[in-house]
Amino acid sequence: MNYNPQSAQEYRQQAVAGAGPLHLVIMAYDVAITACEQRDFSRATRAIGLLRDSLEFEKNPLAPRLFGLYQWCLECVRGENYSPALKTLRSLREAWATLGCRMAADSALPARPRSLPLSSAAG
């Protein structure tokens, strides 16, 4: 079987197009982590910058803290100190993935039955 770069790119585009917001964040972490592992300055800074620039400060009270972490990761990468950035990105990715698993588990649970008012239960 031959590798077709165009097919691989189309597959990635379809995966991104069909992904929800949380999955897109995790995908961005994967790119940033891989880039740091490979010491790919350009890809690492683009991926971390994407994570930073996609923060929604109005909706997420953790956004300022995440912004600071992303800025610090960018400074590490700019200084060619990939190891601490990699450790932080892996921890953050794990946290987002755990959140995704919990959200999926919560949505799979059946709705709790409402308790009946006392007057209906007696009668």
Image: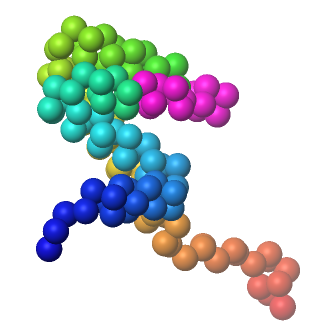
The coloring applied to the image is rainbow
Q: Main secondary structure of the magenta part?
A: loop
Q: Going by the image, does 62 lie left or right of 114?
A: left
| Residue in view at x 75 percent, y 78 percent | 116
Q: Is residue 24 magenta?
A: no
Number of numbered discs on residues: 0
| Whether residue 103 is visible | no
Quadrant for residue 37, please give it: top left
| Residue in view at x 50 percent, y 72 percent | 109
Q: Going by the image, does 97 lie left or right of 22?
A: left
Q: Is residue 50 magenta?
A: yes
Quadrant for residue 100, please give it: bottom left
Nearest the viewer among 111 and 100 is 100
For the C terminus, the quadrant is bottom right
User: Could you tell me residue 112's position as x and y percent?
Assistant: 60, 73
> What residue range appears in magenta?
49-62
Farthest-out residue, bottom: 123
User: Could you tell me residue 81's position as x and y percent?
Assistant: 17, 14
Q: Is residue 23 above or below residue 104?
A: above
For the N terminus, the quadrant is bottom left
| Whether residue 29 is visible | yes
Q: Going by the image, does 19 lie left or right of 78?
A: right
| Residue in view at x 85 percent, y 80 percent | 119
Nearest the viewer among 76 and 113 is 76
User: Could you tell me residue 75's position as x and y percent?
Assistant: 30, 10
Q: Is residue 2 above or below residue 88?
A: below
User: Could you tell me residue 6's position as x and y percent?
Assistant: 33, 58
